[in-house]
Image: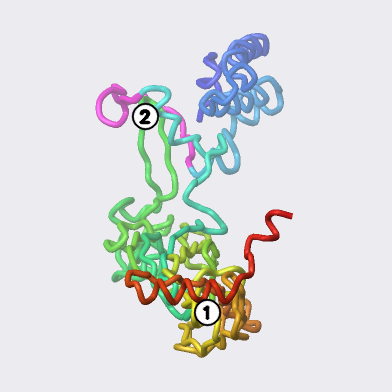
Amino acid sequence: MDFYVILGVERAASSSDVKRAYRRLARKHHPDVNPGDPESEALFIRVTEAYETLVDPARRQDYDEHGVRGARPTVGDVEFEGFDFSGSGAGGESASTFGDLFADVFARSAGVRDRAVSPGGIDLHADLRLSFEDAMRGGFHEVTLTRVARCDACRGTGARLVAEGRCPGCGGSGQSRWTRGHMVFSRQCAQCGGSGRRRHRPCSACRAEGMVSRTEAVRVKVPPGVTHGTRLRLPEQGSATRGGGTGDLTVTVAVEPHPIFRREGDDLHLVVPVAVHEAALGVRAQVPTLGGQATVRIPPGTQSGQQFRLRDRGAPSPLGGEPGDLVITVRIVLPEVIDERSKELLREFGRIHTVDVRADLLR
């Protein structure tokens, strides 16, 4: 990297010539003039380094005698080695635009980050639809989803072990070297990590990404008595990210309604039809519950809408507490009167019981 070439001055240039060249280039490539432009920022760094060396007589003399000491300045893992004017600078990879040249060289210096790396992984969401009975029983159910996971073949490294040999990418030198125009760049060989020896090959299962996409079934443990809209969180069952962790899976439960049971909290409500004579004389009625049939005593004189409670016959508590109750609401059903005998009996019943059932409405 020739400082005189960078500033565009002769080797015999005076300090005034060096200053003028620096001011000209600084006005053009200063980061404040080109905000967000990594190419100009990178060139400004080299122009400043060349100016500070050549404007100081002692440093300039040392540079003229010994050149640049120590490691060459680099941006990211790419090193600018200088210029090569031996070729035409045209055609193939060397025929690149200014923007193409520095897009891959100075991306890291401009703050570009690998968006695939996330320390916490990626959280996923899925829906689980259950029948009323399955929700009351609980147990294990499956949801199918597509997620990203670490490749099992290469254990997420993107590479597989092979017999050691000379690296074909760099010919055993450990450095990859290329030109763009007349500028020469080099960096550590990505295939061998700078060792010159290859011990790995790209993993074919994940195409060297270290990650694979899978569609699979995930078992979800559902607590008995789970309610509609409950969200169940499964740690580390989401998608993984390269260099990061694995996210969580959140499953939202949807419970289908039951044709006869209605849930309120952990209590179940059931409407039980009762005939007129049963409500008047009383009856022991068989009613359905979650655990089978149960007997409920309907006392004589029961009115429509009256409620009875069967303890611990409701829904299981999803929090592990006591189950709810089964609340029975009586609905009196009138018989269909189609024959004269039934009609006469009802008329006689009305003559015996002359209570005005609507008297309270007229007060």
Mark 2: give few (<14), some (14-19) or many (20+) Cα within 10 Å. many
- Asked if residue 84 is among those painted magenta in the image, a careful observer would answer yes
Q: Which mark is residue 278?
A: none
Looking at the rendered structure, the kind of residue marked 1 is Pro
Q: Is residue 10 visible?
A: yes
Name which residue type carries label 2. Arg
Residue drawn at point x = 51 percent, y = 53 percent: 117
Q: Farthest residue toward the right? A: 363
Mark identifier at residue 180:
2
Task: Indicate yes or no whether the magenta region holds residue 169.
Answer: no
- Location of residue 359 with respect to 53 vertically, above or below: below
Task: Work out whether residue 33 or residue 238 is closer to the camera in this orientation and state it.
Answer: 238
Residue located at (44% from left, 31% from top): 103
Which one is nearer the viewer's eye here, 167 or 322? 322
Instruction: Identify the residue shown where x is 64% and y is 69%.
Output: 355
Q: Which mark is residue 224?
A: 1
Q: Which residues are magenta?
A: 78-96
